[in-house]
Image: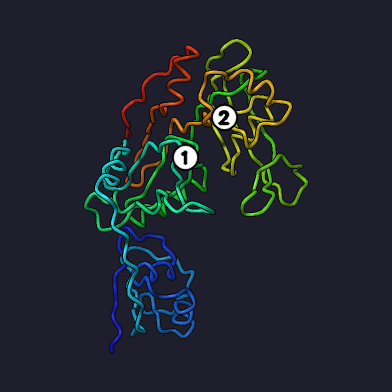
């Protein structure tokens, strides 16, 4: 069988050669791709290339005769009602991205004991596009709010780079037990992960610890109910696992409903202040501002989930409705 050639598309700009191959030939293993490159069977614009070579639009990739590949796995059919429910979560859609208002309690990806999750249902959000949308960041299961999806592989690569480069601004709202002093400031405390797969936690660490990673959060008190409860705006400048939850505990103001991280000495005051309020986690990804892959800046806001809306109403916190998505 003769070799073939394919042209790298605009959407595939800056993708690694091995990932390009596995995108076009899903059954091909990483080891097989590396062997094809090592033996010179794969060429880019007529030249030998390594698996890690970054591609540019318009380049020609030589496709050697391919070994028989296993048939792609069939995607389980999604029930129409489930698909409609997911589609109702969309708060912004264009040719490049989808933005959802993720509900509290919905896992984004699978894990121990999790068989039903958003990542397994993304075919319901194609909206006629040839590619399945891709996750480019994560929210905890019990965190609600703005969740970004890429509609093409090239867009996913650009957005992932934007998140890594800290070009994305994230704003969260939280209701906390306690009233931070001072009412606004910056938390700059290193964090590290500890424990096993089922019991992993994040904790404050000394910066000299080789497992520690610097974590920075700006916070601002937007309103309060006496000295017992407050509404905080949180802006993480780094993206560590459970960063906001652990930083709020360090501030002496654990997030309402966060039984995983609130300390014992804080739990007494914590449980005494929340009578009549929801016990669910009160953490919401309110705003996402990012460079749009097609140019300009996209700003998207998400309305509060029902349990936080009820808590705001009970405490007299006046939260404005989310603005319509803005691209400029």
Evaluate if marks 2 and 1 touch, with contact meaning CB atoms under 8 Å apart: no
Report the quarter where the N terminus lies.
Answer: bottom left
Measuring from the top left, give residue 280's x and y in whole percent: 52, 30
Tell me which residue sits at (33%, 63%) in the image. Answer: 57
Q: Nearer the viewer, residue 202 or 274?
A: 274
Measuring from the top left, give residue 309's x and y in whole percent: 43, 22
Quarter of the figure with residue 218: top right
Tell me which residue sits at (39%, 79%) in the image. Answer: 43
9 relative to 300, above or below: below
Q: Nearer the viewer, residue 50 or 206?
A: 206
Name the residue carrying label 1.
Answer: 168
Q: Nearer the viewer, residue 170 or 113?
A: 113
Tell me which residue sits at (69%, 51%) in the image. Answer: 195
Query: Distance of mark 2 from mark 1, alpha carbons?
Result: 27 Å
Q: Secondary structure at mark 1?
A: loop
Quarter of the figure with residue 305: top left
With 313 as the anchor, is 203 left or right in this view? right
Q: Earlier in the sequence, mark 2 or mark 1?
A: 1
Name the residue carrying label 2.
Answer: 257
Q: Nearer the viewer, mark 2 or mark 1?
A: 2
319 relative to 213, above or below: above
294 relative to 247, above or below: below
């Amino acid at each position: 069988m003769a070799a073939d050639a394919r042209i790298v598309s605009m959407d595939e700009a800056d993708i690694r050669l091995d990932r390009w191959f596995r995108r076009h030939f899903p059954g091909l293993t990483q080891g097989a791709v590396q062997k094809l490159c090592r033996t010179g069977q794969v060429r880019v614009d007529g030249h030998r290339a390594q698996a890690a070579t970054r591609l540019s639009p318009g380049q020609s990739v030589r496709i050697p005769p391919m070994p028989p590949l296993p048939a792609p796995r069939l995607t389980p059919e999604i029930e129409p009602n489930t698909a409609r429910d997911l589609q109702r979560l969309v708060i912004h859609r264009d040719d490049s991205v989808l933005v959802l208002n993720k509900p509290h309690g919905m896992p984004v990806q699978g894990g121990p004991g999790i068989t039903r999750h958003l990542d397994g249902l993304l075919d319901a959000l194609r909206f006629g596009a040839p590619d399945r949308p891709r996750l480019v960041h994560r929210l905890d299961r019990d965190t609600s709010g703005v969740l970004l999806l890429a509609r093409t592989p090239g867009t996913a690569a650009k957005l992932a780079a934007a998140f890594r480069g800290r070009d994305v601004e994230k704003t969260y709202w939280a209701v906390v037990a306690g009233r931070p002093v001072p009412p606004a400031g910056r938390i700059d405390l290193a964090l590290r992960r500890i424990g096993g797969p089922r019991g992993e936690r994040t904790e404050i660490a000394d910066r000299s610890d080789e497992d520690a990673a610097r974590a920075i959060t700006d916070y601002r008190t937007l309103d309060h109910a006496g000295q017992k409860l407050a509404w905080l705006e949180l802006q993480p400048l780094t993206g560590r696992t459970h960063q906001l939850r652990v930083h709020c505990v360090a501030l002496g103001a654990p997030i309402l409903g966060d039984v995983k991280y609130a300390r014992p000495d804080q739990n007494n005051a914590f449980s005494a202040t929340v009578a009549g309020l929801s016990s669910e986690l009160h953490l919401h990804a309110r705003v996402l501002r990012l460079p749009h892959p097609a140019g300009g800046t996209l700003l998207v806001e998400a309305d509060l989930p029902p349990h936080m809306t009820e808590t705001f109403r009970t405490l007299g916190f006046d939260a404005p409705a989310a603005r319509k998505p803005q691209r400029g």
